[in-house]
Image: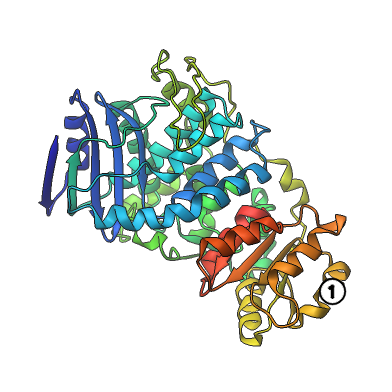
C-alpha cells in the first residue's frame, strides 16, 4: 500500500477505523504545524505510534510511571538509555518530516529501539513493555485525533517493527476520546496538558484560598507542565487538572502557555469562551459529587487483555541479540494514579545546581533560568577553583562547560568522579559541539548527559526533570 494525499479537513477517527480493516502491515504518517505523527499497524492492530515533539521526553515520563512498580527501571538505567539513543533520535525526526512527501524508506523509531533494548537487557519484561507501549500510543493518538488539517501518507512498513504487542484500534480510540472529554470539560481555562501552572505570589500569603491537598504541589510548580507535574507526583493528569481547576478560576494559580516545542501540538480546546451554563456545569463536575474516573490501573488492565498473547518478541540485531518472550494476558503492574511516590516526603528539599563556565554572560543566564524556579544556584567562572567549590557546596547537579581555560570539562569531570562523594551526582556537559567523538569522550570520563548551546529554559528544566526529580 502506498498513498499520498493532501487534506484540508482531516478526519483522523475515520482514517484510523478504515486502517483497522486493513490486513497488511501499514504505516500512517501525518504532518500538521511542523509536527509529524507516525502510526504503525499490523493486520489492523496498532503496534506503535509516535510524534516528533520530544519523543524521549514522552518515553521518560512513562518510564518514570512504571519505575514506581518496576525497580529495574532506575534513574541510572534511564540515563543510560537516553545517552545511547536520544542523540540519534533528533536526526531521525528531521528525516521523518523531510521524507513525508517522498517514497523514502522509514527508519525504526529510535525510542522503539530503546524499548527493545530495555527488554533485551532485562530492565523490562515483555508484558511490562506492552503496558508501556499502550500508554505511549494512547498519548500520541490522543493528539492525533485533534488534527484538523495537514498532509498524510500511507505506506508499507520498512523495516518492520519487532512486534511487542498489538492494540485494538477501537479500544485505544475509546480511551483517547474519554481522556479528551476530560480535558475539554476544563476548556474554560485549560487548553493544553502542556500549560504550566504557577502559584500567584500574593496567594502564598492567603492560605485559606489554597487547597489543602496542594501542600506538595505548590512546591513543584517550577515551570513544569501539567503533564510533567502529574508524573512528578504520580497522579493522573486529568485528575490533577480537575483538582487545580477551582484555584485557576479564582486566580490563586496562573497558567502559562506551553513552552516550545510543545506549543506546536494541537490544543485540547481551541475556543476558551464558554457560555455561563457550560461553566456552571464544569464547576459541578469537579465538585465533591463528581463521579470517580477509571484509574490508570483499570484502564491498563482492560487494554492489556487485548494484546496478542501468543505473539513473540523479536529484537532486531541492530540493538542486541534476539530474545523471545511470551506475552501474558495481563501485566502484573500496579499503575494506580492515586499513589504518591516516596519522593514527596522530601518535598521541602531545595535542589542545588552548580554551573562551571568561564563566560559570565552564560552563568548569568543559568542563574536567571533556575532561580526563577526556586532552585539554589551556584556559579563558578574559574575552572581551577571549581573542585574545592564543588566539595564545599555538595551540589545535587553539576553543569560543566566543555571548553574552558585552565581545566577543560573532560578533565574536571574526571576529577569530580574520582571523589566518592560525587560518584552518583549527575554531571552534564554544556557544549556547542555536536560531534559524536566529543560525546564518547565525555561518556568515558563519567558524563551523565549533554546540553548543547544555545539551549532554552525548557531544555534545562528537561534535564532537571530527568536527573533530579
Residue with the most extreme bottom position: 360
Residue that carries the numbered disc 1 in the rendered image = 389
Could you say which quadrant of the image residue 63 lies in? top right
Viewer-proximal residue among 158 and 337: 158
Indicate the colouring scheme.
rainbow
Task: Decide if residue 29 is on the left or right side of residue 435.
Answer: left
Could you say which quadrant of the image residue 33 lies in? bottom left
Residue with the most extreme top position: 310
Does any portion of residue 115 appear in the rendered image? yes
Estimate the x, y position of residue 255 in percent, counting from the top left.
48, 64
Which residue sits at x=68%, y=45%? 76
Which residue sits at x=12%, y=42%? 3
Which residue sits at x=28%, y=61%? 34
Task: Decide if residue 452 is on the left or right side of residue 361.
Answer: left
* Quadrant of the frame with the N terminus: top left
Q: Is residue 349 above or below residue 144?
A: below
Total tally of numbered discs in the picture: 1
Q: Is residue 153 above or below residue 289?
A: below
Does any portion of residue 209 appear in the rendered image? no
Residue with the most extreme front position: 437
Viewer-proximal residue among 349 and 179: 349
Task: Decide if residue 357 is on the left or right side of residue 153.
Answer: right
Estimate the x, y position of residue 276 in percent, counting from the top left.
33, 56
Estimate the x, y position of residue 442 in percent, counting from the top left.
64, 61
Estimate the x, y position of residue 280 in percent, counting from the top left.
39, 50
Q: Secondary structure at mark 1?
A: helix
Viewer-proximal residue among 320 and 133: 320
For mark 1, does the 10 Å Cα neighbourhood hold few (<14), some (14 to 19), or many (20 or more) residues? some
Amino acid at each position: 500500500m502506498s498513498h499520498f494525499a493532501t487534506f484540508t479537513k482531516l478526519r483522523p477517527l475515520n482514517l484510523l477505523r478504515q486502517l483497522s480493516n486493513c490486513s497488511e502491515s501499514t504505516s500512517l504518517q501525518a504532518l500538521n504545524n511542523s509536527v509529524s505523527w507516525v502510526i504503525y499497524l499490523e493486520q489492523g492492530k496498532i503496534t506503535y505510534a509516535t510524534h516528533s515533539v520530544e519523543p524521549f521526553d514522552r518515553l521518560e515520563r512513562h518510564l518514570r510511571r512504571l519505575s514506581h512498580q518496576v525497580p529495574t527501571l532506575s534513574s541510572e538505567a534511564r540515563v543510560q538509555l537516553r545517552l545511547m539513543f536520544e542523540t540519534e533520535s533528533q536526526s531521525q525526526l528531521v528525516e521523518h518530516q523531510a521524507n513525508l512527501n517522498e517514497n523514502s524508506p522509514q527508519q525504526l523509531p529510535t525510542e522503539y529501539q530503546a524499548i527493545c533494548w530495555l527488554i533485551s537487557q532485562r530492565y523490562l519484561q515483555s508484558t511490562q513493555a506492552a503496558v508501556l507501549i499502550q500508554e505511549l500510543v494512547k498519548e500520541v493518538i490522543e493528539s492525533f485525533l485533534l488534527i484538523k488539517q495537514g498532509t498524510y501518507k500511507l505506506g508499507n512498513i520498512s523495516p518492520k517493527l519487532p512486534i511487542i504487542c498489538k492494540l485494538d484500534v477501537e479500544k485505544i480510540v475509546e480511551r483517547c476520546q474519554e481522556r479528551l472529554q476530560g480535558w475539554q470539560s476544563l476548556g474554560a481555562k485549560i487548553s493544553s496538558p502542556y500549560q504550566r501552572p504557577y502559584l500567584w505570589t500574593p496567594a502564598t500569603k492567603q492560605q485559606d484560598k489554597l487547597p489543602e491537598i496542594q501542600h506538595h504541589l505548590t512546591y513543584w510548580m517550577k515551570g513544569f507542565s501539567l503533564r510533567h507535574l502529574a508524573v512528578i507526583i504520580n497522579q493522573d493528569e486529568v485528575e490533577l487538572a480537575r483538582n487545580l481547576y477551582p484555584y485557576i478560576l479564582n486566580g490563586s494559580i496562573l497558567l502559562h502557555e506551553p513552552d516550545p516545542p510543545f506549543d506546536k501540538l494541537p490544543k485540547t480546546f481551541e475556543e476558551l469562551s464558554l457560555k455561563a451554563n457550560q461553566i456552571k456545569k464544569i464547576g459541578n463536575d469537579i465538585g465533591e459529587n463528581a463521579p470517580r474516573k477509571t484509574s490508570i490501573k483499570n484502564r491498563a488492565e482492560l487494554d492489556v487483555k487485548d494484546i496478542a498473547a501468543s505473539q513473540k518478541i523479536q529484537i532486531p540485531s541492530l540493538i542486541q541479540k534476539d530474545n523471545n518472550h511470551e506475552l501474558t494476558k495481563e501485566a502484573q503492574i500496579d499503575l494506580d494514579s492515586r499513589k504518591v511516590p516516596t519522593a514527596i516526603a522530601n518535598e521541602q528539599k531545595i535542589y542545588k545546581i552548580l554551573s562551571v563556565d568561564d563566560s559570565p554572560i552564560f552563568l548569568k543566564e543559568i542563574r536567571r533560568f533556575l532561580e526563577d524556579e526556586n532552585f539554589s544556584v551556584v556559579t563558578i567562572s574559574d575552572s581551577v577553583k571549581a573542585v574545592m567549590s564543588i566539595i564545599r557546596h555538595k551540589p545535587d547537579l553539576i553543569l560543566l562547560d566543555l571548553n574552558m581555560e585552565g581545566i577543560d570539562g573532560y578533565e574536571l569531570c574526571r576529577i569530580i568522579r574520582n571523589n566518592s562523594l560525587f560518584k552518583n551526582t549527575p554531571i552534564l556537559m554544556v557544549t556547542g559541539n555536536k560531534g559524536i567523538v566529543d560525546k564518547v569522550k565525555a561518556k568515558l570520563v563519567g558524563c551523565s548527559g549533554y546540553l548543547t548551546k544555545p539551549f532554552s529554559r525548557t531544555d534545562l528544566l528537561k534535564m532537571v526533570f530527568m536527573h533530579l526529580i
